[in-house]
Image (spheres, helix red, strand yellow):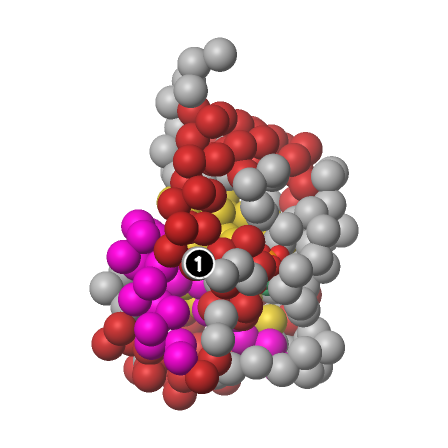
Amino acid sequence: MTRSFRIAPSLLSADFARLGDEVHAVIDAGADLVHFDVMDNHYVPNLTVGPLVCEAIRPHASVPIDVHLMVQPVDRIVPDFAKAGATYVSFHPEASSHVDRTIALIRDHGMRPGLVLNPATPTGWLDWTVDKLDLVLLMSVNPGFGGQAFIPGSIDKVRRVRDLLAAAGSDAPIEIDGGIDLNTAADVVAAGASILVAGNAIFGTVDPEAATRALRTAALRSTSPA
Ligand code: DX5
Ligand code: ZN
């Protein structure tokens, strides 16, 4: 069965002193989205970047910017990402006091809402939200840091969410984030993931362009007839 997928390099592992060049390099290599990790040293024990940096890379990104909010609270930062040119904004439901309201807020600001489930977060969060989501982001590591090992049980979760989305008649893509590399890419695509986030596997190498192409080739193995 042929499955299509998109590659979303995570800037978390990029050289922050040359972010514009890093964005150009992976887009030249065929990246479909740019994944932008926002951490607040509160919801997760790490601190990264916010709307100002998103706005700064916007002119360099000819593909959609895929913002992953690891912040608590969520709502007050949402309008700033609309101004900064984000396309997708995904958030963790346990970080929001009113999940339905946050989804609507993202949509009302002209962006595409996604819900993020950590490795131990139940899929039940999708029960009353699935018809309002443009994306489901499954974490295959605990959020906060790049370069962590892929949690193998994530494959089953991708399958379960794939079935849940199909049963609900949703065509929202499943994005997977954490430990995606040449070894894990094909398996997650085969299970039903269609957006692959990769930080260390791309920007942790000496040649991010070549690494982006290699990841696509590796993921394509799951779409070749056996
Ligand atoms: C982790 C971030 C990821 C991170 C993934 O909390 O959400 O996007 O960059 O990094 P790798 O691909 O190195 O596991
Ligand atoms: Zn992320």
Q: Position of 159 compared to 215: left or right?
A: right
* x and y, in percent, of residue 202 in the image: 49, 56
Q: Who's the residue at 49% across and 61% down the image?
A: 206
Q: Residue 217, position in %: x, y?
A: 42, 36
Q: Is residue 221 magenta?
A: no
Instruction: State which quarter of the image contains the N terminus.
Output: top left
Q: Nearer the viewer, residue 94 or 89?
A: 89
Provide the secondary structure element on which disc 1 rests. Answer: loop
The magenta stretch is: 18-40
Residue at 26% in and 73% down: 60
Residue 75 drawn above or below residue 225: below
Q: Amino acid at mark 1?
A: Asp
Which percent across, then down, holds residue 112? Answer: 37, 60
Q: Residue furthest top?
A: 226
Find residue 153 and report its horizontal and vertical position in percent.
74, 38
Residue 90 is at least partly visible in this image? no
| Viewer-proximal residue among 144 and 60 | 60
Whether residue 104 is situated above or below residue 134 in the rendered picture: below
Q: Is residue 42 left or right of residue 201?
A: right
Q: How many marks?
A: 1
Residue 83 relative to residue 121: left or right:
left
